[in-house]
Image (cartoon, coloured by chain):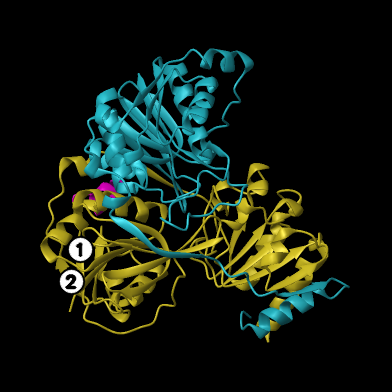
Chain colours: A cyan, B yellow
Amino acid sequence: MNIVVCMKQVPDTWAERTLRPDDSRLDRASVDGVINELDEYAIEEGLRLAEANGGEVTILTMGPEKASESIRKALSMGADKAVHLIDDGLAGSDALQTSAALAKVLGRTGFDLVILGSESTDARMGVLAAMLAERLGVPQVSLASKVEVDGSQLRVHRQTDYGYDQIEANLPAVISVVEKINEPRYPSFKGIMAAKKKPVETLSLADAGIDPGEVGLAGAATEVVSFAKRPPRQAGTVVKDEGDGGAKAAEFLAAQKFI
Amino acid sequence: MAEILVLAEHDGETVKKVTCELLTLARQFGEPSAVWIGAGAEGGRERLAEFGAAKVYVADGGGIEDYVVAPAAEVLAGLVARQSPAAVFVAATPEGKEVAGRLAVKTGSGVITDAVGLTAGDGGPVAEQSIFGGAIVVQSRVRTGTPIVAVRPNSVTAEPAPAAAGIEPAGVELTDAARAVKVTERVIAERGERPELTEAAIVVSGGRGVGNAENFALIEKLADSLGAAVGASRAATDAGWYPHQFQVGQTGKTVSPQLYLAVGISGAIQHRAGMQTAKTIMVINKDPEAPIFELADFGVVGDLFQVVPQLTEEIERRSAN
Protein backbone atom coordinates (compact mmCIF):
# COMPACT_ATOMS: atom_id res chain seq x y z
CA MET A 1 0.00 0.00 0.00
CA ASN A 2 1.29 3.42 -0.97
CA ILE A 3 0.68 5.68 2.04
CA VAL A 4 1.49 9.38 1.94
CA VAL A 5 1.39 11.34 5.19
CA CYS A 6 1.06 15.10 4.80
CA MET A 7 3.07 16.76 7.53
CA LYS A 8 3.34 20.41 8.49
CA GLN A 9 6.08 22.01 10.49
CA VAL A 10 4.57 24.49 12.95
CA PRO A 11 5.95 26.80 15.61
CA ASP A 12 6.16 25.09 18.96
CA THR A 13 2.89 25.76 20.76
CA TRP A 14 4.77 26.33 24.00
CA ALA A 15 6.57 29.32 22.52
CA GLU A 16 5.11 32.78 22.07
CA ARG A 17 3.84 32.93 18.51
CA THR A 18 3.22 36.08 16.53
CA LEU A 19 2.58 37.48 13.07
CA ARG A 20 5.08 39.61 11.15
CA PRO A 21 4.14 43.28 11.06
CA ASP A 22 5.00 43.81 7.37
CA ASP A 23 2.97 41.04 5.70
CA SER A 24 0.83 39.55 8.51
CA ARG A 25 2.40 36.14 7.97
CA LEU A 26 3.38 33.75 10.68
CA ASP A 27 6.76 34.66 12.13
CA ARG A 28 8.50 31.30 11.70
CA ALA A 29 12.03 32.54 12.20
CA SER A 30 11.71 33.51 15.84
CA VAL A 31 10.48 30.17 17.21
CA ASP A 32 11.44 26.52 17.10
CA GLY A 33 9.71 24.46 14.45
CA VAL A 34 8.20 21.13 15.41
CA ILE A 35 6.06 18.53 13.67
CA ASN A 36 2.44 19.57 14.01
CA GLU A 37 1.33 17.45 16.92
CA LEU A 38 -1.71 15.93 15.21
CA ASP A 39 0.51 14.99 12.25
CA GLU A 40 2.57 12.80 14.59
CA TYR A 41 -0.58 10.73 15.05
CA ALA A 42 -0.99 10.66 11.27
CA ILE A 43 2.58 9.41 10.84
CA GLU A 44 2.06 6.77 13.51
CA GLU A 45 -1.16 5.60 11.88
CA GLY A 46 0.57 5.43 8.50
CA LEU A 47 3.37 3.33 9.97
CA ARG A 48 0.93 0.99 11.69
CA LEU A 49 -1.15 0.52 8.55
CA ALA A 50 1.99 -0.17 6.50
CA GLU A 51 3.21 -2.66 9.11
CA ALA A 52 -0.14 -4.44 9.16
CA ASN A 53 -0.92 -4.38 5.45
CA GLY A 54 2.47 -4.03 3.80
CA GLY A 55 3.53 -0.98 1.90
CA GLU A 56 5.53 2.17 2.10
CA VAL A 57 5.09 5.45 3.97
CA THR A 58 6.10 8.68 2.26
CA ILE A 59 6.18 11.98 4.13
CA LEU A 60 5.00 14.97 2.10
CA THR A 61 5.64 18.44 3.39
CA MET A 62 5.40 21.93 1.99
CA GLY A 63 7.52 24.52 3.73
CA PRO A 64 10.81 26.36 3.96
CA GLU A 65 14.29 24.83 4.37
CA LYS A 66 13.80 24.65 8.12
CA ALA A 67 11.08 22.00 7.63
CA SER A 68 13.79 19.48 6.68
CA GLU A 69 14.49 18.98 10.41
CA SER A 70 10.93 17.80 10.88
CA ILE A 71 11.21 15.57 7.82
CA ARG A 72 14.23 13.85 9.39
CA LYS A 73 12.30 13.30 12.58
CA ALA A 74 9.40 11.74 10.67
CA LEU A 75 11.86 9.48 8.81
CA SER A 76 13.49 8.51 12.09
CA MET A 77 10.07 7.42 13.39
CA GLY A 78 10.11 4.91 10.52
CA ALA A 79 8.74 6.52 7.35
CA ASP A 80 10.51 5.27 4.23
CA LYS A 81 11.06 8.44 2.24
CA ALA A 82 9.99 12.03 1.89
CA VAL A 83 9.01 14.64 -0.64
CA HIS A 84 9.68 18.28 0.27
CA LEU A 85 7.88 20.90 -1.77
CA ILE A 86 10.02 23.97 -1.24
CA ASP A 87 9.89 27.23 -3.14
CA ASP A 88 9.93 30.88 -2.16
CA GLY A 89 6.89 31.33 -4.37
CA LEU A 90 4.81 29.25 -1.93
CA ALA A 91 5.21 31.68 0.94
CA GLY A 92 1.95 33.15 2.18
CA SER A 93 -0.25 30.56 0.48
CA ASP A 94 -3.68 30.09 2.05
CA ALA A 95 -5.50 26.80 2.56
CA LEU A 96 -7.03 26.84 -0.91
CA GLN A 97 -3.64 27.27 -2.56
CA THR A 98 -1.88 24.83 -0.22
CA SER A 99 -4.42 22.15 -1.04
CA ALA A 100 -3.94 22.82 -4.76
CA ALA A 101 -0.16 22.51 -4.48
CA LEU A 102 -0.29 19.34 -2.36
CA ALA A 103 -2.88 17.77 -4.68
CA LYS A 104 -0.55 18.40 -7.60
CA VAL A 105 2.31 16.62 -5.86
CA LEU A 106 0.03 13.76 -4.75
CA GLY A 107 -0.98 13.35 -8.36
CA ARG A 108 2.70 12.78 -9.16
CA THR A 109 3.54 10.45 -6.27
CA GLY A 110 0.30 8.47 -6.52
CA PHE A 111 -1.28 7.06 -3.36
CA ASP A 112 -3.65 4.52 -1.92
CA LEU A 113 -4.06 6.49 1.29
CA VAL A 114 -3.28 10.08 2.17
CA ILE A 115 -3.20 10.68 5.93
CA LEU A 116 -3.20 14.04 7.72
CA GLY A 117 -3.65 15.32 11.24
CA SER A 118 -7.16 16.76 11.59
CA GLU A 119 -5.79 20.30 11.98
CA SER A 120 -2.55 22.21 12.52
CA THR A 121 -1.82 23.85 15.84
CA ASP A 122 -0.98 27.16 14.16
CA ALA A 123 -3.75 27.83 11.62
CA ARG A 124 -6.28 25.43 13.20
CA MET A 125 -8.58 25.52 10.19
CA GLY A 126 -9.25 21.80 9.93
CA VAL A 127 -10.09 22.03 6.23
CA LEU A 128 -7.13 20.51 4.42
CA ALA A 129 -8.28 16.88 4.35
CA ALA A 130 -11.66 17.96 2.99
CA MET A 131 -10.04 20.19 0.38
CA LEU A 132 -7.61 17.47 -0.72
CA ALA A 133 -10.39 14.89 -1.03
CA GLU A 134 -12.40 17.37 -3.09
CA ARG A 135 -9.47 18.16 -5.37
CA LEU A 136 -8.34 14.55 -5.77
CA GLY A 137 -11.89 13.25 -6.27
CA VAL A 138 -11.51 10.53 -3.64
CA PRO A 139 -13.47 9.76 -0.45
CA GLN A 140 -12.95 12.04 2.55
CA VAL A 141 -12.58 9.88 5.64
CA SER A 142 -11.87 12.51 8.22
CA LEU A 143 -11.70 12.94 12.02
CA ALA A 144 -10.81 9.27 12.37
CA SER A 145 -10.37 7.85 15.86
CA LYS A 146 -9.98 4.28 14.52
CA VAL A 147 -9.02 3.02 11.06
CA GLU A 148 -9.36 -0.49 9.64
CA VAL A 149 -8.27 -1.48 6.14
CA ASP A 150 -9.85 -4.59 4.67
CA GLY A 151 -8.61 -5.14 1.13
CA SER A 152 -9.73 -2.05 -0.72
CA GLN A 153 -12.29 -1.11 1.92
CA LEU A 154 -11.88 1.32 4.81
CA ARG A 155 -13.89 1.16 8.02
CA VAL A 156 -13.39 4.15 10.25
CA HIS A 157 -14.75 5.69 13.43
CA ARG A 158 -15.38 9.34 12.69
CA GLN A 159 -15.43 11.44 15.85
CA THR A 160 -18.61 13.44 16.37
CA ASP A 161 -19.97 15.68 19.09
CA TYR A 162 -22.19 12.89 20.33
CA GLY A 163 -19.73 9.99 20.06
CA TYR A 164 -18.70 8.60 16.70
CA ASP A 165 -20.04 7.53 13.33
CA GLN A 166 -18.98 4.21 11.86
CA ILE A 167 -18.22 5.06 8.24
CA GLU A 168 -17.16 3.08 5.18
CA ALA A 169 -15.41 4.01 1.96
CA ASN A 170 -13.16 2.52 -0.70
CA LEU A 171 -9.49 3.18 -1.35
CA PRO A 172 -7.90 5.35 -2.53
CA ALA A 173 -8.94 7.90 0.08
CA VAL A 174 -7.88 10.83 2.22
CA ILE A 175 -7.92 10.26 5.98
CA SER A 176 -7.54 12.78 8.78
CA VAL A 177 -6.90 11.54 12.31
CA VAL A 178 -7.70 12.87 15.77
CA GLU A 179 -5.42 12.61 18.76
CA LYS A 180 -7.31 9.72 20.30
CA ILE A 181 -6.33 7.31 17.52
CA ASN A 182 -2.95 6.07 18.77
CA GLU A 183 0.17 6.85 20.75
CA PRO A 184 2.94 8.10 18.44
CA ARG A 185 6.27 6.29 18.84
CA TYR A 186 9.52 8.01 19.72
CA PRO A 187 12.33 7.64 17.21
CA SER A 188 14.76 4.90 18.27
CA PHE A 189 18.52 5.36 18.03
CA LYS A 190 18.52 2.89 15.14
CA GLY A 191 15.72 4.87 13.52
CA ILE A 192 17.65 8.11 13.85
CA MET A 193 20.73 6.57 12.23
CA ALA A 194 18.69 4.99 9.44
CA ALA A 195 16.86 8.26 8.72
CA LYS A 196 20.10 9.88 7.62
CA LYS A 197 20.25 7.62 4.59
CA LYS A 198 16.59 7.76 3.59
CA PRO A 199 15.77 9.56 0.35
CA VAL A 200 14.28 13.08 0.48
CA GLU A 201 13.18 14.43 -2.86
CA THR A 202 12.99 18.23 -3.01
CA LEU A 203 10.61 19.74 -5.53
CA SER A 204 10.37 23.34 -6.68
CA LEU A 205 7.15 24.72 -8.13
CA ALA A 206 8.57 24.10 -11.61
CA ASP A 207 9.55 20.52 -10.70
CA ALA A 208 6.04 19.84 -9.42
CA GLY A 209 4.40 21.47 -12.41
CA ILE A 210 2.67 24.12 -10.28
CA ASP A 211 1.89 27.45 -11.88
CA PRO A 212 3.53 30.14 -9.67
CA GLY A 213 0.41 32.29 -10.20
CA GLU A 214 -1.68 29.70 -8.34
CA VAL A 215 0.20 30.00 -5.05
CA GLY A 216 1.67 32.59 -2.71
CA LEU A 217 0.54 35.62 -0.79
CA ALA A 218 -0.34 37.77 -3.82
CA GLY A 219 -2.93 35.35 -5.13
CA ALA A 220 -4.35 34.15 -1.82
CA ALA A 221 -8.16 34.08 -1.67
CA THR A 222 -8.14 35.42 1.88
CA GLU A 223 -6.19 38.26 3.41
CA VAL A 224 -5.42 39.57 6.86
CA VAL A 225 -6.69 43.14 7.10
CA SER A 226 -5.15 43.85 10.48
CA PHE A 227 -4.06 42.14 13.67
CA ALA A 228 -3.25 43.11 17.21
CA LYS A 229 -2.25 41.51 20.45
CA ARG A 230 -5.31 40.76 22.49
CA PRO A 231 -5.59 43.44 25.14
CA PRO A 232 -4.88 41.82 28.49
CA ARG A 233 -8.04 40.86 30.33
CA GLN A 234 -8.90 43.25 33.07
CA ALA A 235 -7.55 41.91 36.29
CA GLY A 236 -10.30 40.03 38.03
CA THR A 237 -11.07 39.49 41.66
CA VAL A 238 -9.22 36.65 43.32
CA VAL A 239 -10.20 35.58 46.82
CA LYS A 240 -8.60 33.06 49.13
CA ASP A 241 -10.94 30.40 50.42
CA GLU A 242 -11.46 30.84 54.12
CA GLY A 243 -14.37 28.49 54.35
CA ASP A 244 -16.59 30.75 52.28
CA GLY A 245 -14.94 30.53 48.83
CA GLY A 246 -17.85 28.63 47.28
CA ALA A 247 -20.38 31.11 48.66
CA LYS A 248 -18.36 34.06 47.37
CA ALA A 249 -18.13 32.41 43.95
CA ALA A 250 -21.91 31.98 43.96
CA GLU A 251 -22.32 35.64 44.86
CA PHE A 252 -20.21 36.61 41.84
CA LEU A 253 -22.29 34.36 39.57
CA ALA A 254 -25.50 35.87 40.95
CA ALA A 255 -24.19 39.42 40.43
CA GLN A 256 -23.35 38.49 36.83
CA LYS A 257 -26.88 37.05 36.43
CA PHE A 258 -25.68 33.50 35.75
CA ILE A 259 -27.87 32.25 38.58
CA MET B 1 -31.37 42.59 -1.04
CA ALA B 2 -28.35 40.33 -1.17
CA GLU B 3 -28.98 36.75 -0.20
CA ILE B 4 -26.84 35.07 2.49
CA LEU B 5 -26.85 31.28 2.67
CA VAL B 6 -26.76 29.77 6.16
CA LEU B 7 -26.19 26.03 6.47
CA ALA B 8 -28.58 24.85 9.18
CA GLU B 9 -27.22 22.65 11.96
CA HIS B 10 -29.93 20.32 13.16
CA ASP B 11 -30.56 16.88 14.54
CA GLY B 12 -33.34 15.98 12.12
CA GLU B 13 -35.97 17.74 14.22
CA THR B 14 -34.59 20.74 16.03
CA VAL B 15 -32.48 23.63 14.80
CA LYS B 16 -29.37 24.18 16.89
CA LYS B 17 -28.77 27.44 18.68
CA VAL B 18 -25.74 28.27 16.54
CA THR B 19 -27.93 28.40 13.44
CA CYS B 20 -30.14 31.05 15.08
CA GLU B 21 -26.94 32.98 15.85
CA LEU B 22 -25.79 32.70 12.22
CA LEU B 23 -29.17 33.90 10.96
CA THR B 24 -28.91 36.87 13.33
CA LEU B 25 -25.43 37.68 11.98
CA ALA B 26 -26.49 37.16 8.38
CA ARG B 27 -29.20 39.82 8.71
CA GLN B 28 -26.44 42.45 8.96
CA PHE B 29 -25.32 41.55 5.45
CA GLY B 30 -28.53 40.78 3.61
CA GLU B 31 -31.48 38.44 3.62
CA PRO B 32 -30.68 35.05 5.11
CA SER B 33 -31.79 31.80 3.49
CA ALA B 34 -31.32 28.61 5.46
CA VAL B 35 -30.08 25.44 3.76
CA TRP B 36 -31.40 22.22 5.27
CA ILE B 37 -29.75 18.91 4.45
CA GLY B 38 -31.80 15.79 5.21
CA ALA B 39 -35.26 15.16 6.61
CA GLY B 40 -37.16 17.22 9.17
CA ALA B 41 -37.16 20.69 7.60
CA GLU B 42 -40.88 21.13 8.33
CA GLY B 43 -40.17 20.62 12.02
CA GLY B 44 -37.27 23.06 12.08
CA ARG B 45 -38.99 25.68 9.96
CA GLU B 46 -40.68 27.57 12.78
CA ARG B 47 -37.43 28.40 14.51
CA LEU B 48 -35.72 29.32 11.22
CA ALA B 49 -38.62 31.70 10.54
CA GLU B 50 -38.37 33.20 14.02
CA PHE B 51 -34.73 34.13 13.49
CA GLY B 52 -35.16 35.62 10.05
CA ALA B 53 -34.77 32.99 7.34
CA ALA B 54 -36.63 34.28 4.28
CA LYS B 55 -36.32 30.90 2.59
CA VAL B 56 -35.38 27.38 3.51
CA TYR B 57 -33.73 25.39 0.74
CA VAL B 58 -34.23 21.71 1.44
CA ALA B 59 -32.15 18.84 0.07
CA ASP B 60 -33.80 15.65 1.21
CA GLY B 61 -34.22 12.09 0.04
CA GLY B 62 -31.86 9.48 -1.32
CA GLY B 63 -30.49 8.98 2.17
CA ILE B 64 -28.56 12.23 1.85
CA GLU B 65 -27.95 12.42 5.60
CA ASP B 66 -26.14 9.07 5.55
CA TYR B 67 -23.17 10.43 3.62
CA VAL B 68 -20.33 12.44 5.06
CA VAL B 69 -19.75 16.15 4.30
CA ALA B 70 -19.63 15.95 0.49
CA PRO B 71 -23.42 16.18 -0.09
CA ALA B 72 -23.76 19.41 1.89
CA ALA B 73 -20.89 20.92 -0.09
CA GLU B 74 -22.51 19.90 -3.40
CA VAL B 75 -25.88 21.34 -2.41
CA LEU B 76 -24.31 24.62 -1.31
CA ALA B 77 -22.19 24.81 -4.46
CA GLY B 78 -25.32 24.30 -6.57
CA LEU B 79 -27.10 27.08 -4.70
CA VAL B 80 -24.09 29.40 -4.94
CA ALA B 81 -24.04 28.90 -8.72
CA ARG B 82 -27.79 29.49 -9.04
CA GLN B 83 -28.44 32.19 -6.44
CA SER B 84 -25.11 34.07 -6.41
CA PRO B 85 -25.36 34.82 -2.67
CA ALA B 86 -23.26 37.56 -1.10
CA ALA B 87 -21.80 35.08 1.39
CA VAL B 88 -22.17 31.60 2.86
CA PHE B 89 -22.11 31.11 6.63
CA VAL B 90 -21.65 27.77 8.36
CA ALA B 91 -21.10 26.87 12.00
CA ALA B 92 -17.44 26.41 12.90
CA THR B 93 -17.93 22.82 14.00
CA PRO B 94 -15.43 20.26 12.69
CA GLU B 95 -17.98 19.14 10.10
CA GLY B 96 -19.10 22.67 9.24
CA LYS B 97 -15.50 23.64 8.54
CA GLU B 98 -15.03 20.60 6.30
CA VAL B 99 -18.13 21.55 4.32
CA ALA B 100 -16.73 25.08 4.03
CA GLY B 101 -13.40 23.71 2.79
CA ARG B 102 -14.95 21.60 0.05
CA LEU B 103 -17.27 24.42 -0.97
CA ALA B 104 -14.28 26.76 -1.23
CA VAL B 105 -12.57 24.37 -3.65
CA LYS B 106 -15.76 23.82 -5.68
CA THR B 107 -16.46 27.53 -6.05
CA GLY B 108 -12.87 28.82 -6.10
CA SER B 109 -13.68 31.00 -3.09
CA GLY B 110 -11.77 32.04 -0.03
CA VAL B 111 -12.74 30.52 3.28
CA ILE B 112 -12.32 31.88 6.80
CA THR B 113 -12.80 29.59 9.78
CA ASP B 114 -13.47 30.14 13.47
CA ALA B 115 -14.72 33.70 13.14
CA VAL B 116 -15.80 35.06 16.53
CA GLY B 117 -17.31 38.20 15.04
CA LEU B 118 -18.24 39.66 11.65
CA THR B 119 -18.52 43.27 10.56
CA ALA B 120 -19.34 44.85 7.22
CA GLY B 121 -16.30 46.02 5.26
CA ASP B 122 -15.86 47.60 1.83
CA GLY B 123 -15.39 44.31 0.05
CA GLY B 124 -17.78 42.17 2.10
CA PRO B 125 -17.71 40.75 5.60
CA VAL B 126 -14.61 41.22 7.76
CA ALA B 127 -14.12 38.35 10.19
CA GLU B 128 -12.52 38.56 13.59
CA GLN B 129 -10.48 35.55 14.62
CA SER B 130 -8.62 34.80 17.79
CA ILE B 131 -5.40 32.92 17.07
CA PHE B 132 -2.36 31.38 18.77
CA GLY B 133 -4.20 30.39 21.87
CA GLY B 134 -6.11 33.66 21.95
CA ALA B 135 -2.97 35.81 22.12
CA ILE B 136 -3.65 37.66 18.87
CA VAL B 137 -6.83 39.05 17.36
CA VAL B 138 -6.94 39.08 13.56
CA GLN B 139 -9.32 40.80 11.16
CA SER B 140 -9.44 39.07 7.81
CA ARG B 141 -11.55 38.98 4.69
CA VAL B 142 -12.14 36.95 1.58
CA ARG B 143 -11.00 38.59 -1.63
CA THR B 144 -11.78 35.87 -4.18
CA GLY B 145 -15.14 34.34 -5.01
CA THR B 146 -18.07 34.11 -2.61
CA PRO B 147 -16.99 34.71 1.00
CA ILE B 148 -17.37 31.48 2.98
CA VAL B 149 -17.18 32.00 6.72
CA ALA B 150 -17.31 29.40 9.49
CA VAL B 151 -18.50 31.16 12.65
CA ARG B 152 -17.99 29.83 16.16
CA PRO B 153 -21.01 29.12 18.33
CA ASN B 154 -21.74 31.84 20.93
CA SER B 155 -20.15 34.58 18.79
CA VAL B 156 -23.37 36.61 18.93
CA THR B 157 -26.63 36.45 20.83
CA ALA B 158 -29.42 35.12 18.66
CA GLU B 159 -32.21 37.69 18.29
CA PRO B 160 -35.58 36.98 16.70
CA ALA B 161 -36.72 38.86 13.57
CA PRO B 162 -39.56 36.87 12.04
CA ALA B 163 -39.50 36.10 8.33
CA ALA B 164 -41.37 33.81 5.97
CA ALA B 165 -39.06 30.77 5.89
CA GLY B 166 -40.72 29.56 2.71
CA ILE B 167 -39.62 26.04 1.96
CA GLU B 168 -38.15 25.41 -1.51
CA PRO B 169 -36.43 22.34 -2.84
CA ALA B 170 -32.71 22.98 -3.24
CA GLY B 171 -32.97 21.34 -6.62
CA VAL B 172 -29.43 19.98 -6.66
CA GLU B 173 -28.82 16.46 -7.96
CA LEU B 174 -26.12 14.68 -5.98
CA THR B 175 -23.29 13.05 -7.91
CA ASP B 176 -22.07 9.54 -7.12
CA ALA B 177 -18.91 11.10 -5.69
CA ALA B 178 -20.98 12.72 -2.93
CA ARG B 179 -22.04 9.22 -1.87
CA ALA B 180 -18.50 7.87 -1.51
CA VAL B 181 -18.43 7.84 2.30
CA LYS B 182 -21.38 6.19 4.00
CA VAL B 183 -22.36 6.25 7.64
CA THR B 184 -23.30 2.71 8.64
CA GLU B 185 -23.93 3.35 12.32
CA ARG B 186 -24.15 6.34 14.66
CA VAL B 187 -22.80 5.62 18.10
CA ILE B 188 -24.05 7.99 20.75
CA ALA B 189 -21.98 8.32 23.89
CA GLU B 190 -23.79 8.91 27.15
CA ARG B 191 -23.91 12.56 28.03
CA GLY B 192 -27.19 12.72 29.87
CA GLU B 193 -29.25 15.86 29.49
CA ARG B 194 -26.28 18.19 29.30
CA PRO B 195 -25.95 20.69 26.47
CA GLU B 196 -23.38 20.11 23.75
CA LEU B 197 -19.92 21.29 24.75
CA THR B 198 -19.26 23.67 21.86
CA GLU B 199 -22.76 25.16 21.97
CA ALA B 200 -23.22 25.50 25.71
CA ALA B 201 -23.62 28.95 27.23
CA ILE B 202 -21.83 27.72 30.36
CA VAL B 203 -18.99 25.19 30.50
CA VAL B 204 -17.52 23.69 33.67
CA SER B 205 -14.15 21.98 33.12
CA GLY B 206 -12.03 19.85 35.42
CA GLY B 207 -8.31 19.26 35.23
CA ARG B 208 -5.42 17.55 36.93
CA GLY B 209 -6.51 18.83 40.32
CA VAL B 210 -9.68 16.73 40.17
CA GLY B 211 -7.44 13.76 40.89
CA ASN B 212 -9.36 10.79 39.47
CA ALA B 213 -12.33 9.71 37.39
CA GLU B 214 -14.72 9.33 40.33
CA ASN B 215 -14.13 12.91 41.44
CA PHE B 216 -15.44 14.15 38.10
CA ALA B 217 -18.86 13.59 39.64
CA LEU B 218 -18.20 16.84 41.55
CA ILE B 219 -17.61 18.68 38.27
CA GLU B 220 -20.73 17.14 36.74
CA LYS B 221 -22.83 18.09 39.73
CA LEU B 222 -21.62 21.69 39.57
CA ALA B 223 -22.29 21.72 35.81
CA ASP B 224 -25.79 20.36 36.31
CA SER B 225 -26.59 23.01 38.89
CA LEU B 226 -25.87 25.62 36.19
CA GLY B 227 -27.31 23.72 33.22
CA ALA B 228 -23.78 23.65 31.85
CA ALA B 229 -21.73 21.32 29.68
CA VAL B 230 -18.77 19.47 31.18
CA GLY B 231 -15.28 19.80 29.73
CA ALA B 232 -11.89 18.50 30.76
CA SER B 233 -8.28 19.51 30.34
CA ARG B 234 -5.90 17.35 28.39
CA ALA B 235 -4.26 16.17 31.61
CA ALA B 236 -7.62 14.78 32.70
CA THR B 237 -8.52 13.14 29.39
CA ASP B 238 -5.00 11.71 28.92
CA ALA B 239 -5.27 10.19 32.38
CA GLY B 240 -8.54 8.58 31.32
CA TRP B 241 -10.58 10.41 33.95
CA TYR B 242 -13.01 11.82 31.41
CA PRO B 243 -13.81 10.85 27.79
CA HIS B 244 -11.61 12.35 25.12
CA GLN B 245 -14.41 14.06 23.19
CA PHE B 246 -14.85 16.46 26.10
CA GLN B 247 -11.29 17.74 25.96
CA VAL B 248 -11.05 21.52 25.75
CA GLY B 249 -7.83 22.91 24.30
CA GLN B 250 -5.34 23.01 21.49
CA THR B 251 -5.87 19.38 20.45
CA GLY B 252 -9.49 19.19 21.56
CA LYS B 253 -12.59 21.35 21.36
CA THR B 254 -12.62 25.12 21.24
CA VAL B 255 -15.37 26.68 23.31
CA SER B 256 -16.52 30.26 23.51
CA PRO B 257 -19.21 30.25 26.20
CA GLN B 258 -20.70 33.12 28.19
CA LEU B 259 -19.20 31.60 31.33
CA TYR B 260 -16.29 29.20 31.70
CA LEU B 261 -15.43 27.64 35.04
CA ALA B 262 -11.95 26.13 35.21
CA VAL B 263 -11.63 23.81 38.19
CA GLY B 264 -8.27 22.33 39.14
CA ILE B 265 -6.78 23.46 35.82
CA SER B 266 -3.40 25.21 35.79
CA GLY B 267 -4.00 26.95 32.47
CA ALA B 268 -1.18 25.82 30.19
CA ILE B 269 -1.29 27.41 26.72
CA GLN B 270 -2.65 24.06 25.44
CA HIS B 271 -5.77 24.59 27.49
CA ARG B 272 -6.07 28.33 27.04
CA ALA B 273 -6.15 27.90 23.27
CA GLY B 274 -9.51 26.21 23.68
CA MET B 275 -11.28 28.59 26.04
CA GLN B 276 -9.66 32.02 26.04
CA THR B 277 -12.50 33.68 24.12
CA ALA B 278 -15.03 32.86 26.85
CA LYS B 279 -16.83 36.03 27.94
CA THR B 280 -16.51 35.46 31.69
CA ILE B 281 -13.99 33.12 33.31
CA MET B 282 -14.11 31.76 36.83
CA VAL B 283 -11.20 29.81 38.30
CA ILE B 284 -10.99 27.50 41.28
CA ASN B 285 -7.46 26.29 42.01
CA LYS B 286 -5.38 25.71 45.11
CA ASP B 287 -2.21 27.12 43.54
CA PRO B 288 -2.31 30.95 43.58
CA GLU B 289 0.55 30.95 41.02
CA ALA B 290 -1.42 28.94 38.44
CA PRO B 291 -1.36 30.88 35.13
CA ILE B 292 -5.10 30.38 34.69
CA PHE B 293 -5.67 33.09 37.32
CA GLU B 294 -4.36 35.62 34.76
CA LEU B 295 -7.57 35.02 32.82
CA ALA B 296 -9.92 34.95 35.78
CA ASP B 297 -12.71 37.48 36.16
CA PHE B 298 -13.27 35.80 39.48
CA GLY B 299 -10.94 33.33 41.12
CA VAL B 300 -10.95 31.32 44.30
CA VAL B 301 -7.65 30.11 45.68
CA GLY B 302 -8.62 27.04 47.60
CA ASP B 303 -9.18 23.31 47.74
CA LEU B 304 -11.68 22.40 45.05
CA PHE B 305 -13.01 19.59 47.23
CA GLN B 306 -14.18 22.24 49.69
CA VAL B 307 -15.08 25.05 47.30
CA VAL B 308 -16.93 23.13 44.58
CA PRO B 309 -19.49 21.36 46.83
CA GLN B 310 -20.18 24.63 48.64
CA LEU B 311 -20.60 26.47 45.36
CA THR B 312 -22.91 23.77 43.99
CA GLU B 313 -25.02 23.80 47.11
CA GLU B 314 -25.23 27.59 47.08
CA ILE B 315 -26.26 27.66 43.40
CA GLU B 316 -28.93 25.02 44.06
CA ARG B 317 -30.20 26.97 47.07
CA ARG B 318 -30.39 30.24 45.14
CA SER B 319 -31.97 28.56 42.11
CA ALA B 320 -34.62 26.94 44.29
CA ASN B 321 -35.69 30.30 45.71
Point 47% across, 22% down: residue: A47
- At which x and y percent is residue A147? 43, 31
Say if residue B182 shows up in the picture: no
- At which x and y percent is residue A195? 52, 17
Point 27% across, 73% down: residue: B122
Q: Amino acid at mark 1?
A: Val
- Answer above or below: position of A165 versus B227: above
> The N terminus of chain B lies in which quarter of the figure?
bottom left
- Single out the residue that lies furthest toward the front: A22
User: In this picture, which residue range is highlighted in magenta?
Assistant: B62-72
- Crowding at mark 2 (Cα within 10 Å: few <14, some 14-19, many 20+): some
- Answer above or below: position of A98 versus B51: above
Q: Amino acid at mark 2?
A: Ile
- Residue B167 is marked as 2
Mark 2 falls on what kind of element?
A: strand
Q: Are marks 1 and 2 in contact (CB under 8 Å)?
A: yes
A20 or B196: which is nearer to us? A20
Q: Is residue B68 magenta?
A: yes
Q: What is the chain identity of the residue bearing mark 2?
A: B
- At which x and y percent is residue A259? 63, 81
- Answer above or below: position of A14 versus B195: above
Same subunit: marks 1 and 2 = yes
Point 25% across, 66% down: residue: B87
Q: Is residue B104 left or right of residue B14?
A: left
A123 or B2: which is nearer to us? A123
Q: For mark 1, what is the residue?
A: B58
- Answer above or below: position of B175 versus A54: below
Point 41% across, 38% down: residue: A176
- Single out the residue that lies furthest toward the right: A242
